[in-house]
Image (cartoon, rainbow, N blue to C red):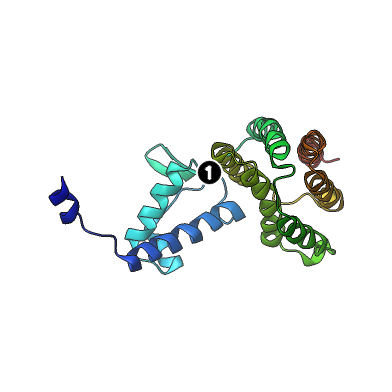
Amino acid sequence: MRADIERTPSLDPLQLNVSLAAYAALRDRLLSGALPGGSVIQERRLAEELGFSRTPVREALQKLEGEGLLARQDRFLRVVEITVSEVMEILAVRQTLESDAARAAAGRMSAALIQDIRERIESMADPGAVSDAAHWAVDDLLHLSIAKESGNGLLLRLISDLRQKTRLFGLHRIPSRFGSGKDEHLAILDAIEQGDGALAAQRMTHHIGQAREGILRVLSGR
């Protein structure tokens, strides 16, 4: 057994870095909508566009397929397409999971982290000056920090996966939700800082419920 271990080749750090870079670039394209749901993945073309060889791109695609962002359909690899009914189901599950995470994180999150998140939220004063990428970065910081501080690794992984699928739906920002979403985020942080788990859970449930309603209003043209 020891001889087998010693004969196992170590990973080339350079190749590993290239693979990670290809993965990050492709994941960004998926979540930003540059590769919309239903798109057929063309490995050679992507490699040329991103400036990578095909090997790291192929490895990145395999990882993204494993994460459920890509799927095989009719012999082709395609970007997963999230329907309206699916995103409603995802948000319903997120309400339950993220309210549990907020309850568990109450009183556990450091004052420094809370202050950092609060400052980043408050810095987004003008919606016209905030890119979709910056908006999602702050949103991820809040929601994933809360999930992480819940102390439950499985909960963090589930929430992260569901948030990725929410982004795949393709509705990247709801203008009417910009101000109210910020206020709801700050209210959740306040409850966590106070150590009030029940209030933090209640506010998280309300926040995701309002996001769901916002999506429905946009889709119905209201």
Q: Residue at x 66, y 50 (%)?
A: 145
Looking at this view, is 174 or 113 the one in front? 113
33 left or right of 24 in image:
right
Q: Which residue is mark 1?
A: 38
CA neighbours of label 1 inside 10 A, class few (<14), some (14 to 19), many (20+)? some
Looking at this view, is 89 or 78 the one in front? 89
Percent across and percent down for residue 96 are 69, 30
Type of amino acid at the residue the image marks with label 1 = Gly
Quadrant of the frame with the N terminus: top left
Q: Secondary structure at mark 1?
A: loop
Percent across and percent down for residue 176 are 85, 49
Farthest residue to the left: give it: 3
Regarding residue 125, the answer to whether it shows in the image is yes
| Residue 214 occupies quadrant | top right
Percent across and percent down for residue 89 are 66, 30
Quadrant of the frame with the C terminus: top right
59 left or right of 204 in image:
left
Looking at this view, is 59 or 183 the one in front? 183
Up the image or down, 16 lies above or below 219; here it is below
Up the image or down, 115 lies above or below 145; here it is below
User: Disc count in the image?
Assistant: 1
Regarding residue 170, the answer to whether it shows in the image is no
Q: Residue at x 59, y 45 (%)?
A: 164
Looking at this view, is 195 or 28 the one in front? 195
Q: Residue at x 66, y 33 (%)?
A: 97
